[in-house]
């Protein structure tokens, strides 16, 4: 199984109820050999229509932060916990997120094998870190986790969600400061 095959599977997936109202499943976008993968929550309206992740206002902000640390959007990989837009942008339900991450997200991470996985927002963070963690305490601090099934280790960097940060000056500054730490974290991990 390679990433192109996985993309084909995702495009025609009907494993949970979200396929019923989607226009396009959103596989993700970027370098299949990226050193860093960003993971949001779920596609929104624009993403559902275009079939690409993070292309609305939050996506433009995410792209500008990626560029602020000397990378291009094409250098990283961007995806979401669930690949189909939940109706009216509701939160993904646990069973939807479980199915989608078990079938697709972990596979994507294994195949890309990035040095760092940056989670965007609480929902994405709790896919990887215990729910006793608070994003206000752990944002910007890398954590090591082991996938119980595959025993593979991943470095997780919890970040605030760009959509939340866009409309909250304090969070915006925090998120921008956390982004500035990424080059140093990547350098350390690549040693
Ligand atoms: N918000 C997300 O979490 N993901 C997207 O793709 C767009 C907005």
Image (tube, rainbow, N blue to C red):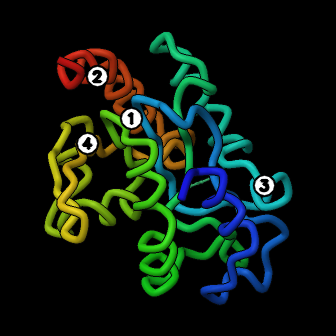
Q: Within 8 Å of ligand 1, the CB of disc 4?
A: no
Badge 4: how crowded within 10 Å, few (<14), some, or many (20+)? many
Find numbered disc 4 in the image and state the secondary structure of the residue it sits on: loop
Q: Which mark, by number, is residue 170?
A: 1
Q: Earlier in the sequence, mark 4 or mark 1?
A: 4
Apparent side of residue 144 relative to residue 122 in the rendered image (left or right): left
Q: Position of residue 18 (x, y in %)?
A: 67, 82
Q: Give the spatial CA distance, label 3 vs label 4.
A: 29 Å
Q: Earlier in the sequence, mark 3 or mark 4?
A: 3
Find numbered disc 2 in the image and state the secondary structure of the residue it sits on: helix
Q: Position of residue 6 (x, y in %)?
A: 61, 60
Q: Which mark, by number, is residue 51?
A: 3
Q: Within 8 Å of ligand 1, the CB of disc 3?
A: no
Q: Residue at x 52, y 23 (%)?
A: 66
Badge 3: how crowded within 10 Å, few (<14), some, or many (20+)? many
**Mark 4 or mark 1: which is in front?**
4
Q: Earlier in the sequence, mark 2 or mark 1?
A: 1
Question: Residue at label 2?
Answer: 186
Proximity of marks 4 and 1: CB atoms separated by less than 8 Å: no
Find numbered disc 3 in the image and state the secondary structure of the residue it sits on: loop
Quarter that holds the C terminus: top left
Apparent side of residue 94 relative to residue 13 in the rendered image (left or right): left
Q: Residue at x 19, y 46 (%)?
A: 138
Proximity of marks 2 and 1: CB atoms separated by less than 8 Å: no
Question: Residue at label 4?
Answer: 139
Q: Earlier in the sequence, mark 2 or mark 4?
A: 4
Asked if 3 appears above or below 20 in the picture, the reply is above
Asked if 16 appears above or below 68 in the picture, the reply is below
Q: Give the spatial CA distance, label 4 vs label 1.
A: 14 Å
Q: Give 148 or 145, whichever is nearer the viewer.
A: 148
Q: Give the spatial CA distance, label 2 vs label 4.
A: 16 Å
């Amino acid at each position: 199984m390679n990433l192109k095959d996985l993309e084909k599977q995702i495009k025609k997936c009907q494993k949970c109820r979200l396929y019923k109202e989607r226009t396009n499943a959103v596989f993700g976008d970027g370098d299949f050999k990226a050193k860093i993968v960003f993971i949001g929550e779920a596609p929104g309206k624009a993403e559902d229509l275009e079939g690409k992740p993070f292309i609305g206002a939050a996506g433009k902000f995410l792209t500008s932060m990626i560029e602020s640390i000397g990378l291009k959007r094409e250098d990283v990989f961007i995806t979401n916990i669930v690949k189909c837009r939940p109706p009216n942008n509701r939160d993904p339900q646990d069973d939807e997120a479980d199915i989608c991450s078990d079938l697709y997200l972990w596979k994507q991470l294994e195949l890309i094998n990035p040095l760092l996985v940056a989670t965007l927002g609480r929902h994405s963070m709790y896919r990887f870190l215990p729910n006793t963690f608070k994003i206000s305490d752990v944002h910007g601090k890398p954590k090591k986790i082991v996938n119980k099934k595959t025993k593979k280790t991943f470095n997780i960097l919890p970040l605030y969600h760009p959509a939340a940060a866009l409309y909250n000056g304090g969070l915006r500054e925090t998120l921008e400061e956390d982004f500035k730490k990424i080059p140093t974290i990547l350098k350390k991990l690549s040693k």
